[in-house]
Amino acid sequence: MNKVELLAPAGDLERLKFSFLYGADACYIGGLDYSLRANAQNFSLDQIKEACLFAHKLNKKVYVTVNIIFHNEDTQNLEEYLKNLEICGVDAIIISDLFVAKLASEVAPNLKIHISTQTSTLNYEAVNFLKKLNVERVVLGREACREEIKEIIDKTKIEVECFIHGAMCASYSGRCVLSNYFTNRDANRGGCAQICRWCFPLYDTNDNEVLSDTKFTMSTKDLSMITNIKDMIDIGIASLKVEGRMRSNYYVATVINTYRNAIDDYYKNNLTDEKIKYYQKILNRCANRDNKEQFYNSFPTEQEQYYLGRNEVSNQDFLGIVIDYNEYNSEVTLSQRNYFKKGDVVEIFGPSIEPFTFTIPDIYDEEGNILEVANHPEQIIKFKIPKKVYQYDIMRIKL
């Protein structure tokens, strides 16, 4: 039995490295063109090549999104772009327009084809049709329930990928035109302005505004499938995908590390209910919105939506990233991210260590001056620590 793939988002090269270090088997990224996250930093061709070299040294994979909905003018330089992706060593492209699959097979035959969730694939007949186009994998629409996913897997011979964590869209598989109308930005060509999360006044049938302290929104709560991981692997899903190419290093590291541990526990027959509750607690702490199972076990209700405001919170758990550790004096060098001070109880976690808790001792700046607090983002600070840590380990508020 092939082990399920954990697929992580990466908005830039640094986040790609964090994703791999914290347990991802593959990353999906966007180039400077043809990607649905135009506001992410994204990757130049040179950076895509560097990402592939980094990944392949770790025996991991890189997929590039080419998943906008193409208009005539978007097709002009696509052939050259696909050829360059093949030269860079990209393992697969993620597409929503079937003409891209045809063109890639002609000009870049070594590029494997994954069908994007933007295609809204929700039945096995469509999946079998895509198989005839030499598609290797289909990312099912997030509207698919468990029974539909299982039937598709049972009645096809193609890899199936499903989302397990991250933001949802109020429209079908992300195919939304609200941004076009409100901001003249095309969501299906990378310009989503997240109109569904705006707050709107309500009016009655006589066009009178309904006065209320709370405005109306169309936003959905986030997706989280940690409580269903066992079942999703059992029914044969090939790849478990995390959304979030615009998210922070802390978010990516925390979410990927948590699902990595859960998946590994599954294969060790050690994924207990207690562990799932612990993992769920970690995921809830790094999120700024509530999360739900959404479509997997039942059709969503008003409980899966934000109709009366977004209820988002600013997350201050992320305290810093380890830059270096001195074994001779047990001193850590940290790049600070959020406020902390001497006496705070914190936790460090990382890909190569078990999380551990300690109390912050005296804090020093780079010149050795003692600090009352660490309150300047990205300030380099030093202090003693009770256990060995490694570069890219993360310090957070104690769970």
Image: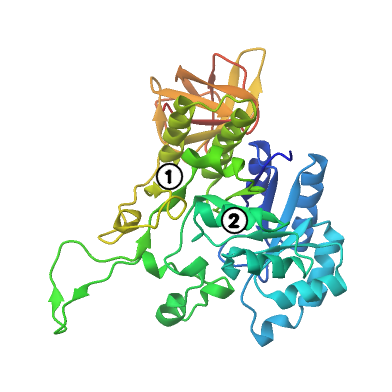
Q: At x 30% / y 52%, what residue is drawn?
A: 311
- Residue 399 got which mark? none
Residue 120 vs 185, above or below: the answer is: above
Residue linked to disc 1: 287
Query: In this orientation, does residue 246 appear?
Result: no
Residue 315 vs 12, above or below: the answer is: above
- With 373 as the anchor, is 226 left or right in this view? right
In 3D space, how far apart are the residues under numbered discs 2 and 1 (Cα atoms)? 32 Å
**Dot 1 surroundings within 10 Å: few (below 14), some, or many (20 or more)?**
some
Q: Quadrant of residue 96?
A: bottom right
Q: At x 64% / y 84%, what residue is drawn?
A: 71
User: Is 232 in front, or is 191?
Assistant: 232
Q: At x 53% / y 72%, what residue is drawn?
A: 191
**Colour treatment of the image:** rainbow
- With 110 as the anchor, is 244 left or right in this view? left
Q: Amino acid at mark 1?
A: Ala
Residue 190 vs 150, above or below: the answer is: below
Look at the numbered disc 2 and give the secondary structure of its residue: helix
**Dot 2 surroundings within 10 Å: few (below 14), some, or many (20 or more)?**
few
The answer to whether mark 2 and mark 1 are in CB contact below 8 A is no
Q: Amino acid at mark 2?
A: Glu
Q: Quadrant of residue 34?
A: bottom right
- Residue 151 got which mark? 2
Task: Give the percent coordinates (x, y) of residue 360.
Answer: 44, 20
Q: How many marks?
A: 2
Residue 302 vs 372, above or below: the answer is: below
Query: In this orientation, does residue 234 appear?
Result: yes
Q: Quadrant of residue 212?
A: bottom left
Task: Give the percent coordinates (x, y) of residue 385.
Answer: 54, 17
User: Is 229 in front, or is 326?
Assistant: 229
Mark toward the start of the polypeptide (2 vs 1): 2
Quadrant, the N terminus? top right
